[in-house]
Image (spheres, grey):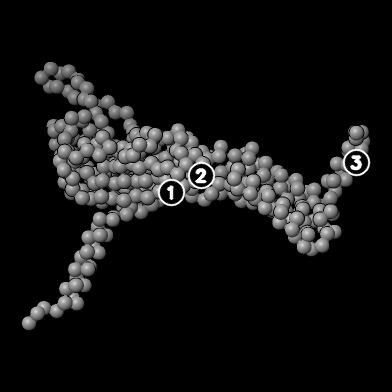
Amino acid sequence: MFTPDQAKVFILDQLSKPYSWWIGVGLAAIGGVFWGKMKAPLSNYVLAAGIIAIGLAVWIHPSVRTQPAFVRVLCTIAALSTLGSLSYFTLWVPKRVMTFTAFCNSSEKRSDAEIAGIKWSDRYTELQVTIVNRSDSDFSDVDLVIMVDQPLAKAAVLNDAQAVIAWHESPQVAMQVLKRDTGRMYSLPTVMVASLRGCRLRADVMPRKSSIILVFAVVAVNEKHSDTSPNFSVKFPHDDGKAVWIGRDMHTDDIYEKLRPTPKTVSISGRFQALERENEVDRLIQVEQPFEKAVDELRKLGELGASTNPPAR
């Protein structure tokens, strides 16, 4: 058993040796990643630095430094491999384990079409956004805000994912109308007609190798309306230019323009938990136009065929 004085001498002796400092730095880095719940990619950088520090400590340790070069290299590689393997399966966060894609379907649909509970309109442009968990671990507390460069009228979860989507930053508005014949005020039930503020997606758990598919109805708001019509809307602008439109709950599709818009970009921001650590999301993705591309390819093939087949004489 060590006496207090002997323990003090031993600790001071160990602290005076360089390899002890490197071991301390490595353990502090690894412990900081775990206890501090650092966010990627900083956590990965700190974790790698900690493993390298411990590998350097092994390399300069007296019991290893005096060995032949082959044995010295082998011991260092063994230490790095062991720590690297353990860290990879416990603390390492792969880059972009959550991926996103978006595509627009501008084809017309039947008048009685319904998509994910949304009664479709010929004024809507269909936009689908797919969020994929490609990692080998479940995500939790998924909280994302999806914004499109065109106003949204409706949003829903298309597949069977356990997720909820709702308007983001929906203002609380109370409208009243004065009836001149009675002089009394009556309230008007209102709803969100369209929004550039996007939608908020929440999911308690997103299982590994799973996806969440969202469908949005993209519209252009008809600003030329009659104040006495049920299709009136009130625009509420924001400082960042992303407005929302509030209108009557009994509005018709005439509140939207007949010319349907084509979304170009989707921004996704927020966070989720992976391996008990918070990960941030901040992505801007381009909306794919697969049907337009197919039509363009067919048109090009038709033009190529016409140019390579001269008219018969």
Residue 234 visible? The answer is: no
Question: In this image, 48 relative to 70: left or right?
Answer: left
Question: In this image, 242 relative to 12: left or right?
Answer: left
Instruction: Please tell me which residue lies in front, 243 or 13.
Output: 13
Residue 31: image x %, image y %?
Answer: 67, 41
Circle nearer the N terminus (1, 3): 3
For image coordinates 25% across by 39% down, the residue present is 115
Residue 154: image x %, image y %?
Answer: 27, 38
For image coordinates 92% across by 37% down, the residue present is 6
* Disc 1 secondary structure class: strand
The amino acid on which the numbered mark 3 sits, given as a three-letter code, is Val
For image coordinates 55% across by 46% down, the residue present is 93
Residue 277: image x %, image y %?
Answer: 56, 39
Instruction: Please tell me which residue lies in front, 4 or 169.
Output: 4
Mark number, residue 91: none
For image coordinates 19% across by 72% down, the residue present is 305
Instruction: Please tell me which residue lies in front, 304 or 258.
Output: 304
Which quarter of the picture shows residue 195?
A: top left
Question: In this image, 158 relative to 177: left or right?
Answer: right
Mark number, residue 9: 3
Q: Between marks 2 and 1, how big is the CA–CA gap?
A: 14 Å
Which quarter of the picture shows residue 109?
A: top left
Circle nearer the N terminus (3, 2): 3
Circle nearer the N terminus (2, 1): 1
Residue 204 visible? The answer is: yes
Instruction: Please tell me which residue lies in front, 225 or 122.
Output: 122
Residue labelled with disc 1: 99
Mark number, residue 136: 2
